[in-house]
Structures are given as structure tokens and as C-alpha cells.
Image (cartoon, rainbow, N blue to C red):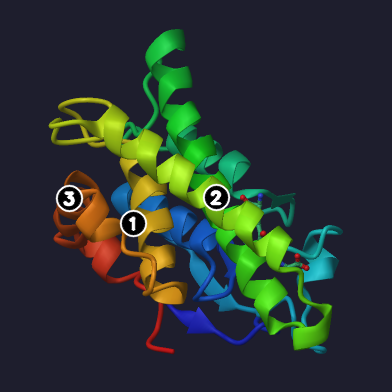
Amino acid sequence: MAIRPTNAGSQRMKLIASLTSPFARKVRVVAAEKHIDYDLVVDIPWNEDTRVPQYNPLGKVPVWVLEDGKTLFDSRVIVEYLDSVSPVGHLLPREPRPRILVKRWEALADGVCEAAATVFLERKRPAEQQSQAWIERQLGKIDAALEMMSEDLGDQEWCTGEFFNLSDIATGCALGYLEFRFPEIDWRRRHPNLSALHERLMQRPSFRDSAPPPA
Ligand code: GSF
């Protein structure tokens, strides 16, 4: 995998991503676990010179560019595609109920990332424009979601039981994002089982290699 500037042309598949996006990290972990080769194009969608809107009209990363130039977004669509094109280590079960339970975990974990990113952005606004009530509302979602994750994980090794899958990847990316942006949220002490899950995940090269860069 090579990190290339945004203007590199290539027939190889590309992932357009920022290195801090938890949604992009989910895609990077999935691609690594599935041994899918691609070029990583780092593009920060908030920068003036971003080219993300040329690939995704919503202006958000991650975007996956296929060999023929077709673009895929958002992260849930991308990871489902990557899982379906490579037979290596399925990350989504085939059976409807187990499959939808994994996607439910993913929705919960992505929801934590959305709420956390909302708080992060709100806090970057001028102090007098920030809404404390809005911030509290989002932090409440994060707390409630962590509570549910911890309860559903229980004393299992992985989120849905004995097999590692997309539910663990999505959850690990959400926990990693909280650790990165909100070190003051004490989820490790409140939910030791989530902390242990995160430690287990960080032993995997896919997680270690995609950790957010030091701030
Ligand atoms: C969320 C992507 C997103 O919010 C997904 O891919 O799963 N549902 C989408 N990306 C953010 C960066 S981050 O918070 O990960 C983004 O690109 N924001 C730019 C913007 O203009 O909103």
C-alpha cells in the first residue's frame, strides 16, 4: 500500500481518506484483513484544495475508487463491497439474522463516531456560537451506545460471539476515535470489557497500522 498525493492517476483501486476519520479507518482495517490491495490517497475534506467533492458529491471521506473509475461511498457500502469481492476471511455472515446483527453493531458504532465528530466540530466553532445543550445531547448518545455495546459484548471474546467480524472492526474504530479525540471520556474504566476488546483488536496489524496519527 502506498500513500500518494491526491493528484496521482492510477488504474489501481484507490481509497480517498483522511488519516483521522474513523469511517475511513474501518475501510482500511477491512481492506487489510481481506488482503485487498489499493492506493491510499490522503485528502482532508475540510481543506480548501480538497478534491473529495469530485469523487463524492456529499464531500465526505471515505470514498473508494474502483478500477474503472466508479466511486463507492459511504463506508458501509464500501466494506460490504470489499467483503463480497474477496473470499478471504468473511467479515459479514451470509445468513440473514447473524448478518443483520453484525450490521446493527456497525450502525451503533458508526453512530458513536457521528455523535463524537459532531461534538468535535461544534467545539471548534467560536465559543459564543457553541450550543452546550447540543453537545450534551451528542455526549448522551455516546454514553448510551457504549452502555449497550458493553452489555451486548458481555464476557464474549468478540462482539457477536466467538468469531471476529465487521462488528468488532466498527466497534474498535469507534473506541479508537473516542480515545483519540476525547481522552476525557472514561469508557475504559466504566466498561472494562470494551477496554479488553480494544486491547485484543490492537494486537492485529490491521488495527495497529491504521491508528490515528498523534495529534
Ligand atoms: C460518514 C463519513 C463522514 O462523516 C460514512 O462514510 O460512513 N456515513 C459516512 N466523514 C467525515 C470525516 S470523519 O468525521 O470521519 C467527512 O468527510 N466530513 C466532511 C464533511 O464535509 O462533512
Quadrant including the C terminus? bottom left
Amino acid on which disc 1 is placed: Ala
10 Å crowding of disc 3: few (<14), some (14-19), many (20+) = few
Q: Which residue is mark 3?
A: 192
Give the residue drawn at x 37%, y 21%: 93
Where 151 sits versus 213, above or below? above
Q: Quadrant of residue 57?
A: bottom right
Percent across and percent down for residue 106 are: 47, 38
Percent across and percent down for residue 178 are: 42, 65
> In front: 203, or 179?
179
Disc 1 is placed on an element classified as: helix
Q: Which residue is mark 2?
A: 140
Percent across and percent down for residue 68 are: 70, 53
Q: Which residue is mark 1?
A: 32
Q: Are marks 3 and 2 in contact (CB under 8 Å)?
A: no
Where 42 sits versus 140, above or below? below
Amino acid on which disc 3 is placed: Pro
Circle nearer the viewer, 1 or 2: 2
Q: Quadrant of residue 81?
A: top right
Disc 2 is placed on an element classified as: helix
Amino acid on which disc 2 is placed: Gly
**Cα–Cα span, label 3 and label 2:** 19 Å
